[in-house]
Amino acid sequence: MMSNPQEKALDEKPHVDEFTMDKEIARTHTRAKFKLLMHERYAHVVLICSFLTAVLYSISFSGLEVLPQLSFFAFCGAALCILYFGLKKLNWLVSRKAFLWGILIMTLAGFNAVFEISVFHYFNGIVVTFLFALIAYTAAGGRDFDVGAPSFWLNVLKIIRSHFTAGFAIINTGRKASRLTKDSVAFRVIMGIILAFPVGGIIVALMLSADAVFAVLVSDFFADIVIRPARILWHIIVVVFMTGYFAGWLYSVKFKQASNVNIGLLKPDNIIALTFLLVLNIIFAVFCYIQFAFLFTGGANTLPPSITYAEYARTGFFQLLFITIINFSVLIAFLKLFDKLAPAIRLMLLFLAIFTGVLIASSFYRMNMYIDVFGFTPLRLMVITFLTMETFFLAAAIIALFRPKFKLIRFFLVVGMVFFLIANFTSTAYFSGRLNTARHFDNTRQFTFNIANSHFLGVDNAREMIVIYRATDDHHLQFAIRSMLGDLQRRYQNEPWQSRSLIKRINLRHIDNFMH
């Protein structure tokens, strides 16, 4: 595509570091790159790709009643195809391997399409946004990137932020490139349609009043078609805005890459570092002593009179989870920002890692005791999943303490993404409902089915409620279950296609068969 001499000359220019060269030269270089993109052939491709993506976005996500489920899966698949062919047409596609990340995108989107709505459906949207930018950046760059470098994530964030000014300028150039002038065929066709609307409307109105049969047939045809001007206007606004966003997004992929940002390694002050870590370790040492004295021993020591062992054991796991996150932040800060750790500081960090392990064990213990009494919920299963992930993180942090070349950030990203995928399954009402039903029929467990439990109220648990309905002789429980299933049937009767999911559709069929 780059046959133009001006374009070829620009491509052959050596890479210029825009962070270090003279500002005026930087502006000139940026204007030259922008002028290249503004060439009508490139702008035309960017405009088409951006417009198609914006239309898909509007159909998939615009509307208060739309939830990101089946539409999220459909949008991600189509957007990946548009991105691939767009980069290829623009001659920017250097590394096809970058699109292997698309497997991860479709897996995350698939969870949205399979399970009923959950908090992870929205987290998936955030992660997928980063993954799309990562794919575009690496596909257009075509070289190895250091995911631990700040410049890598800075470039990814710049793509996500988009460049609206360039985006709308590209739209204008693309419009001119499409040759939509008053003498063009397309323009004249559009004008003919516009002029036909008022005249045709008058003719149809006269026909409706002149022929009763024609009026009835037209009325029946449009009976189920509801035209909502406000919604149509909203979709138009979303398409225009998102077209500018996606056009600026593609511009940022190619022309807004930052040079490596060297934040510099801090030269540690041994006194400050040791004092800081010593204070933290003293606090954790006292806390861990209490865990061993009162929690892990089953309350062998005397608890305060106002606290029962059950209350003490079954609270605080969320707070401990956040404390471990703080500890990991401290560990990473020392490992990544300090060039060389003194032996005493390394020992203090090792103690901090050990105390973090005790916190994780305490959180596991408390959560398991809580589940034994109250059963599973998506939130409790999410905590268990992320505590398991933190165990792997802790092992990696300890290894990095003694092996400075260990790729800690890369390990965290890979393992974190694996457990994020696992949590998409374990942290669902479907999975917790299946576990609770199994515990309900296990006579060795304390947990019993309670219709008031929030994790049994969703459509993903319809099958479980039907199983318990048929197995119980409690007429009050049967009546409550039947009423709840009827409410679910009515609630999802006219659901938009964007919000459908596989498990939901299967369970709604179970409900229909059960109610009849």
Image (cartoon, rainbow, N blue to C red):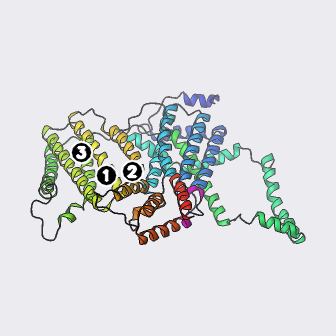
Amino acid tagged 2: Thr
Q: CA distance from mark 3 to mark 1?
A: 22 Å
Seen at 41% across and 43% down, the residue is 153
Residues 345 and 426: in front is 426
Seen at 23% across and 36% down, the residue is 399
Badge 1 marks a residue whose secondary structure is helix
Badge 2 marks a residue whose secondary structure is helix
Residue 79 shown left or right of residue 104 in the figure: right
Q: Which residues are magenta?
A: 489-499
Residue that label 2 marks: 426
| In this view, 92 is above or below 423 | above
Q: CA distance from mark 2 to mark 3?
A: 28 Å
Residue 254 shown left or right of residue 319 in the figure: right
Mark before the other along the chain sequence, 1 or 2: 1
Give percent across and percent down for residue 109. Answer: 50, 47
Quarter of the view holding residue 312: bottom left
Residue 166 in view here: no
Residue that label 3 marks: 331
Badge 3 marks a residue whose secondary structure is helix
Seen at 67% across and 66% down, the residue is 228
| In this view, 484 is above or below 394 | below
Q: Are marks 1 and 2 in contact (CB under 8 Å)?
A: yes
Mark before the other along the chain sequence, 3 or 1: 3
Which class describes the residues within 10 Å of circle 3: few (<14), some (14-19), or many (20+)? many
Residue that label 1 marks: 384
Residue 137 shown left or right of residue 184 in the figure: left
